[in-house]
Structure formats: C-alpha cells, structure tokens
Amino acid sequence: MKDNPLFVGLVAAFLVVVSIAAVSFLVKMNSYSEAYKKESSRNMSLQEQLETVKAENAALKTKSSELKYEVDSSGAKIKDLKNEVAGLEKLKQKLEENLKEELVKKELGQPPQANAIAGDDVQKPVEKNVPAEVKN
C-alpha cells in the first residue's frame, strides 16, 4: 500500500464520504425521532379528546332521547288539555244558554224549569234568619 498512494487516497476519501453520510443520516434520524415523539404525544392527546367527545356524545344522545320522550308526553298532555278545553267550552256555552233562558223566563214571569244537563242538582238557596226588610 505504500507504493500506491492513489489507492490510499481513494480509500480515505471513501471513508470521509461514508462518515459524512452517516452523520447526515444520524441527524435526519434524530429529527425524525423528535417529530415522531411530538406526533405520538399529539396522537395520545387526540385519543383522550376523542374518548371525552364520545362520552359527551353518549350523554347528549341519552338526554336527547329523554327530551324527545318528554316532548311526546307533553304533546299527549296538550292534546288531552285541548280536548278538555273544548269540552269545557261546550259546557260553558250550554250553561250560558241555560242562564239566558232562565233570565228570559224570570223576566217574563214564568217559573224556571229544571236544568237539562244530566247530573246537575240545582238547589234553591236556603233563607236563614233573613230580616223581612231584606227579603222585600
């Protein structure tokens, strides 16, 4: 080897190029390792957030179904109340008609007739110890 300096120079140059390539490769690997660690920690935090969002979603779905049930039951109650109001309106109209008839009959001097509504027990007021001055 001492007699071939060209060969020794080429080997030395090759070793220098290989060492530069190795150092460059190690630097790249180090930067990729740091990026991997950052992305790995980011991925873990995103997984935790995803689990939290899934739990919130499940809770909201449960609450939504409860609210839907309440809306449905409230709708049924509203229908019942509307039906009851309609029945009461009819009853009110019937009572107003009966009252008008009674007032007209009273004005004409006719005796009042029994109420036509079933189940109504109309009682005359009882006069108790009312002075004669008030009665007239």
Image (spheres, grey):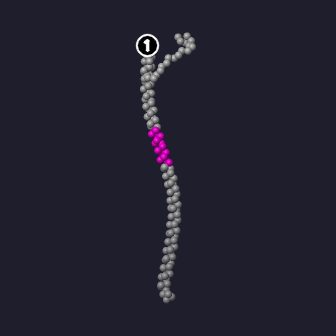
How far from the left and from the top, in percent, is residue 57? 48, 50
Residue at 50 percent across and 79 percent down: it is 15
Q: Principal SS element in the magenta part?
A: helix
Q: Which residue is mark 1?
A: 110
Magenta segment includes 116: no
How far from the left and from the top, in percent, is residue 108? 43, 13
Asked if 63 appears above or below 90 in the picture, the reply is below
How far from the left and from the top, in percent, is residue 62? 48, 46
Asked if 43 appears above or below 99 in the picture, the reply is below
Q: Amino acid at mark 1?
A: Gln
Residue at 56 percent across and 12 percent down: it is 131
Asked if 75 appears above or below 129 in the picture, the reply is below
125 or 21, which is in the foreground? 125
Residue at 46 percent across and 22 percent down: it is 120
Q: Magenta segment, which residues?
A: 59-73
| Disc 1 residue crowd, few under 14, some 14–19, many 20+, Cα 10 Å | few
Q: Residue 93 occupies which quadrant of the picture?
A: top left
Q: Secondary structure at mark 1?
A: loop
Task: Give the mark count.
Answer: 1
38 or 113, which is in the foreground? 113
How far from the left and from the top, in percent, is residue 50? 49, 54
Magenta segment includes 69: yes
Residue at 48 percent across and 87 percent down: it is 4
121 or 30, which is in the foreground? 121
